Amino acid sequence: MPEFGELLVIGGGPAGLTAATTAARLGIYTTLLDEQPAPGGQIYRGVEEAPKPRAELLGPDYQRGARIVQAFRASDAKHLPETTVWSLGPDGKVGILRDGQARIIQASRIILACGATERAVPFPGWTLPGVMNAGAAQILLKSSGVVPADGLVIAGAGPLMLLLAWQYLRAGVRVKAILELSPHVNLWHAAPRLPSALLAGHYITRGFRYLLDLRIGGIPVHFGVSGLRALGEEQLNAIEYLHHGRCHTLPTGQLLIHFGLVPNTHLTEAAGCRHIWNPGQQCWLPATDDWGNTSASGIAVVGDNATIGGARAAEHAGHLAALEAARALHRLNTTERDRQGKDDRGWMRDDLRIRPFLEALHHLPESLLATRDDDTLVCRCEEVTAGQIRQAVREGHTDPNQVKFISRCGMGPCQGRQCAHAVAHIVADETKRPISEQTPFRVRPPVRPISIAQLATLEPSKESA
């Protein structure tokens, strides 16, 4: 048996924790690898240590994470925190970095539960100090109770903006405005999907509650905003935007941006898993079956790492992937797997009914995704602008990977996590070819920064018979 068990679960959010807990309960020797020092992932970050007032401020959905973490702690699953996964091969070999030591390990099955990241959408001024991702601000709130002192503006698209504004309202933070950048026409596109979404009505009810509380709290919410610009020289001091055909300027020293989530696909791409373009979520997703299996043998992917569905759906997906691992490892037969997974499949299906409605409502226009202001920095690592990318396309480099080769866009420390989608949209816009026909940046190890000195310590893991 491999040293680290029969099953490796990578990622300690709701999907990974549920998968590891379920697998251990089924008698599978399971190890969970997590970059963070404590389980919970981004959505439940700091949930074990959060003081009661902070947990109550963040709401019941956040508090639910404490029960998931407790169940994992009580299981027989092995936990390796502060462990970076820097490679994953098609053969299932995993490169990890722990305590400064690089190793190659392997297990019979792997479940990827690496979650999602905020979609990076470059716009004029987005690199100014004072502009930051809403998710990063929420992490500060969850982990340390840190909130902006002088008020802020939240701009972008998606329900997270309402949740964060609601949490800030409860914390006494002044939210000057919420700017929704998805166009008004999205209401018409979303309307036919509303009846199905009502079957997951608790999400609709919660959204209306947030809006009502924000209105009562005097926080303006503007829909159909466009032309967002962050203004300032060395520091953000105001934002500019178009609304109802008029240009508005709003002084602020803090702008939180959020343009939805996209799965962390670096490991699935490195492992050679097949990916597909999802027009609703406007991103590439690893192709999976109902149990999380990918095209790479023995590798499953679950939760927001597979498709954006939220924490509840991630729990169900983690449970189903663990059942499938138990079947593959001969702990369950197919009939028993199906029986134990029946409820989760139904619950997850019901939970995801809201997604087509939300995706249509918050669908981002190509004019925003393609970053048509040539002076806007797209690749922050290598300081490549939208204009330089367009020029590369005009010179005949009509594929994102060709643009990457000629401009070094995507070759910096983040390995394209911040710019890959923007580059693909710019290339698609410039070539007049659908984004679905663009080839994502090729991913090679290491997918996370690792030093030559750390690689020099590399040794294969010992395996017991």
Image: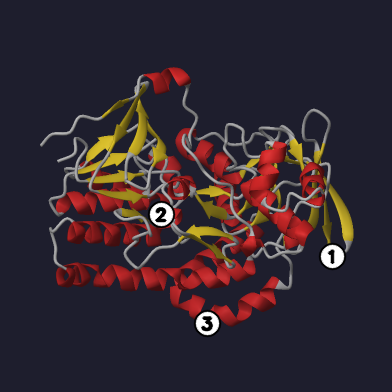
User: In the image, residue 428 lies at what x, y percent?
Assistant: 72, 59
Q: Determine crowd level at label 3: few under 14, some 14-19, many 20+ residues with C-alpha closer than 10 A.
A: few
Horizontal relation, residue 301 to residue 26: left or right: right
Depicted 364 relative to depicted 46: above or below: below
Viewer-closest of 37 and 384? 384
How far, Cα to Cα, is label 1 from label 2?
36 Å
Secondary structure beneath label 3: helix
Please tell me which of labels 1 and 2 falls first in the chain: 2
Question: Looking at the rendering, in which quadrant would you find the C terminus?
Answer: top left
Secondary structure beneath label 2: helix
Residue on which disc 3 sits: 195
Viewer-closest of 380 and 433? 433
Please tell me which of labels 3 and 1 falls first in the chain: 3
Res. 60 mark:
2
How far, Cα to Cα, is label 3 from label 2?
26 Å
Closer mark to the observer between disc 3 and disc 2: 3
